[in-house]
Image (spheres, rainbow, N blue to C red):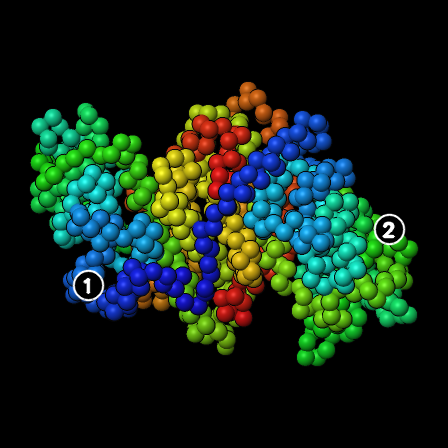
Amino acid sequence: MAESDNIVVETAEKIFADLADPQTINNDKKGSWQAPLWQALSEAGLPLSWVPDDLGGSGASLADGFALLNAAGRFAVAVPLAETMLAGWLLAQARIASPEGEMTVLPASPKDRITLDADGSLSGRTRGVPFAKAAKHFAVLAHGKDGVSIALVDAAKARIEAGLNVGYDHSDTVTLDKVQPVTLKPAPKGFDQTTLMLLGGVARSLQIAGALESMLDISVRYSNERVAFEKKISKFQAVQHNLARLAGESAAALAAATSAADAIANAKAFDDEVYLEAASAKIRCAEAAEKGGAIAHQVHGAIGFTMEHILHRYSLRALAWRDDFGSESHWAVELGKLVAHRGADELWPLVASR
Amino acid sequence: MTAALRFDPIRLPEKCEQLRKEVRAFLAEEIAAGTFDPHKPNREDTDAPEFSRRVGAKGWLGMTWPKKYGGQERSFLERYVVTEEMRVANAPTRRFFVADRQSGPVLLKYAPEHIKMEILPRICRGEICFAIGMSEPNSGSDLFAAKTRATKTDGGYLINGTKIWTSSAHIADYMIAIFRTSPPTKENRRHGLTQFLVKMKQPGIKVNPIGQITGQYEFNEVVFTDHFIPDDHVLGEVDGAWKQATSELAYERSGPERFLETYYVLTELVRAVGPNPDTRSAEGIGRLVAQLHTMRRMSVSVAGMLQAGKEPVVEASIVKDIGTVWEQQLPHRVRDLAAFVEETATNRETLERQLDFAIKTAPKLTIQGGTTEVLRGIIARGLGLR
């Protein structure tokens, strides 16, 4: 949980505690917290955690980066940290150096496609791109006649229709119309859009798990303060059992997400076992966001439904994160197809493979 | 943070995978020899003493215990693998399951040396069956309201009263039970109960089978009338059973049996929908597999904590709460998803027969070994709410 076991997480938690306190941010209607937070994160090299030193990043391990995303979820951090990390990681797959500043990835949904034309330009329309409006560059995965390529694109060359997700963060529609990339290189063998979606999905799972840990924390605290019918509401068995269920959902999300992160960090290839881990994490964390978030709100009553209370910063973001890089419905269908294709007697060996 | 819940991503070590192959090969031989049918989950009232001995001969009973008591000094993670493979295969584990999981560890901790030397090797050989005597007609979840009396007499105790819902008592050689040796005190209502080792099939013990809604007779009423138990069969502190009960719960509550009880219907559903399922079936199966995978990761994580010498009581309670609710709902979800399975599916009859049994089994899963309500109370205490 909040224990920091590595220097990356420790650094990040200190920055979050100083500059991303949810209550302070919630009171700040002008958004003046954003620039100093991003600057501190950048100076610490965190947005480019997954970019090797020689490509302009800080060269942290996948595992450290995952732990950082879990911490970011605990603070419901609303700057494009996860997005820039994913973009830097995607570019590094093709040995493309990362520029400074905010980035995000295209596409951010399994169904959308960017195509690479014969003249080397990129075209396509992608919806639900997180923080596109804030990004200076896009890391793009494109399909051409020779296979999959990875490109760095100047955000100014794209058409962006701004939108907000259910958590009030930017989730935009980005259209590339014969845009010439800054750099374009072939993706490594075997790397495809599914690989990107699985990693993005695990990133979101860790953020959801982090948000649920905080929802549990503030809900328990609130129940120990709030008095109704002349006693603390934490003393009512109905409330206790709701909170026990929230703890279960939080624990399930954390277990699924950290297991998937560990599987990817140690994977030699994106095989069926890694697929099971990553898809399961997104499915189970999305379910937990729904069930757990509902309990956190129920415990808080009307105050949790107000803009001035911080609960919505976690609950709505956790719900919004369900949609990115493939919803739980998408992954459930894909995982179900995989299981059916392998056959009934191969289900248990898959589940028990590690 | 108020709640320091941890579920670290524990992986089973390489030697577990070797062991898993051995267990699968053994079970395949047993199935081929006709010992049991893996497609027939209603094994609960089948007693398989010869199978039990063969499992013991493999060294898979009491496998974490010291060698001098017949154990193998292997890890909890290895035991975990044996347990889950047996469960998934629907192997007839009734005769040895309780002794291996629960009774043996209690004896290891609290029995006098000569009793350990006498009984533990027999558990390891798969020779003897244990029951657990906790509930009574007027005390179930409220364990410390037990009234069955143990009255001091020359060289031992005389037992009078009734235990109930006692699984396997009709075949058991021993029972580990709690009896009242003193009244509760004003300060501590849990005071006054003592844990005993009971030798079954003796004068003063009458076992009456109780029919269950599955049509089986696997639990019983056990009536004690002036049954004598010698002094050296007291386990632990007289009047102090309440101090001994809690740490065992992590073992009992977090194992693979807490979410795999109805797993067979999921396998059969996958078989019934075939290699190219429609979207509805695919999504339903995908969600169930994701939930199953998550619970297994949580359960393995708790096994890892146990191996590391921790007492993850709250985490174990979470595993049992989520796991038993899931395995209880599973047959109903599978029934939903199977509603449009082709009439021609080759395993249609098997699936229907399994669903019939699983749906009847489901209600007990959130009651046995600690009800959902009790578990949520334990979790709430862990969260600092009570």
Q: Counting other residues with Cα less than 10 Å from the Cα at mark 1, is it few (<14), some (14-19), or many (20 or more)? A: some
Q: Counting other residues with Cα less than 10 Å from the Cα at mark 2, is it few (<14), some (14-19), or many (20 or more)? A: some
Q: Residue at x 55, y 38 (%)?
A: B18
Q: Residue at x 35, y 36 (%)?
A: A269
Give SS at disc 2: loop
Residue holding disc 2: B201
Relative image position of residue A178 (x, y in whole percent): 9, 33
B181 and A259: which is toward the camera: A259
Report in which chain the residue with disc 1 lies: A
Residue holding disc 1: A40
Relative image position of residue B347 (x, y in whole percent): 58, 25
Structural distance between the alpha carbons of marks 1 and 2: 74 Å
For residue A314, above or below residue B262: below
- The answer to whether B51 appears left or right of A224 in the picture is right
For residue A192, above or below residue B208: above
Question: How many marks do you count on the picture?
Answer: 2
